[in-house]
Image (cartoon, rainbow, N blue to C red):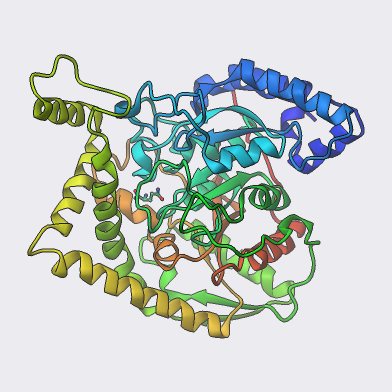
Amino acid sequence: MELYELSIHEALAALDRKEISSLDLTEAYLTRIERIDPSVQAYLTVTADQARAAARQADLRRAEGHAQPLLGIPIALKDIFCTRGIETTCGSRILKGFIPPYDATVAERLSEAGAVLLGKTNMDEFAMGSSTENSAFMPTHNPWDLGRVPGGSSGGSAAAVSAGLAAASLGTDTGGSIRQPASLCGVVGIKPTYGRVSRYGVIAFASSLDQVGPFARTVPDCALMLRVIAGHDPRDATSLPDPVPDYSSLPPGSLRGIRVGVPDEYFVSGMEPGVENGVRRAIDTLIELGAQVDTVSLPHTQYALAAYYLIAPAEASANLARYDSVKYGYRAPNPTSVLDSYQRTRGEGFGPEVKRRIMLGTYALSAGYYDAYYLKAQKVRTLIKADFDQAFARFDVLVAPTSPTVAFPLGSKTQDPLSMYLSDVCTLPVNLAGLPGMSIPCGLSDGLPVGLQLIGPPLGEEMLFRVARAYEATGQWTPTIPPLP
Ligand code: GLN
């Protein structure tokens, strides 16, 4: 077994037994990145020297007897997280060259936990997209088939973990950007309850929907990552004060008595048969584990996509107003006036999808249209939340597909924004309702990973990990790094 194949828990055990050092582990990942990343293109920035220094530091601390939950574990961060002294572009030309003067809370918590940062991963510009092809810099390739997308917008983070280019990583999920790429890359990813993880220092897309979460190859690794980053942060006013359970110490067990709902509306038309089969097989496994499974209806699901594509762009149009050529990153050369500087900087700095969202959002918020679009979408959002509230009166957890399709070929949806938007039809409602959602691999369809989505009530992360661990322990899916040339 190669060092980059170890799970976090296996690596921590090997470090404790002094069989390996964090520097060995870090070098293994850096070598792998050098060899493999030219074809996967998961990383925008590799911080090799800083990683080596952090690994040496971790080895010293371990030798001195310090116990930290991720001491010496190499991880990656989506380029949406501010990292002090390290370029942070959010996948956009407009932030090219932006070096934040501070760390996002999650970056700080990972480093306090002893993690070693390998670098910053590629993403759709400002997290708008489902394929990572909206990155201003390059597309990322799916490690399972280099001709296909890794999903998005956190495609670089998902692909890095999938290809053994990091032990774990962080992404953000506004409408599916952790769960959908986790599904397409065959890794575990969780979008926690809105407010569970601090958004301080996370570049904002749609502030009422954005949430941070981890990717890992195993359920316990994902749980450990979440435990480290979750919890109250006085610097984020939406951060929840509730204590953080020790998700990663849950032993795999039976699911006897657990009530599992299967929402009819998530088996949408256009879903690939291989995806539906994989998900149905996984549901059968949950029954074998003792779960009581029944169907449930979430009748307003069909309006979620429309509501999301008003609310998210509306919030984005407000959030992205700050890129005005004055304070951050790119500025168009030789402006003739302030207005000229704004116009050319934004015109040259933003890509087409970001411009589309700013225009949609500005329109939806403008006088005369606000009530018809934005306000109406907010009312629909309330109905979607009420559907879930009713379902969770009867069920402990809901299970559904994560994405209606497996990874699609690069370029196949870039000319058709609506078909790209449909990639998140099963994940968006969860963000609108602020709930925790997780994707775990549940098999392959024609050699490509299929994801099973688990949805919980507010702060129901523990239940998601419990079901996910029980499923993972059946061995129906073995965490696998796909063979790469
Ligand atoms: N694909 C969705 C969008 O483009 C969701 C993105 C996300 O979750 N950041 O908005």
Judged left or right of residue 400, residue 377 is left
Judged left or right of residue 250, residue 274 is left
Which of 136/349 is in front? 349
Tell me the residue at 68%/66% (across/down): 467
Which of 360/58 is in front? 58
Judged left or right of residue 147, residue 53 is right
| Quadrant placement of the C terminus | top right
Farthest right residue in view:
17
Judged left or right of residue 422, residue 78 is right
Where residue 240 sits: x, y (%)?
A: 54, 62
Farthest front residue in view:
234
Tell me the residue at 50%/81% (across/down): 391
Where residue 57 sits: x, y (%)?
A: 76, 23
Decide: is 328 above or below 216.
above
Q: Is residue 162 visible?
A: no
Number of callouts in the render? 0
Where residue 173 sits: x, y (%)?
A: 46, 51
Which of 13/303 is in front? 13
Q: Is residue 95 visible?
A: yes
State the image quarter where residue 452 is shown. bottom right
| Quadrant placement of the N terminus | top right
Where residue 484 sits: x, y (%)?
A: 60, 27
Decide: is 415 above or below 349.
below
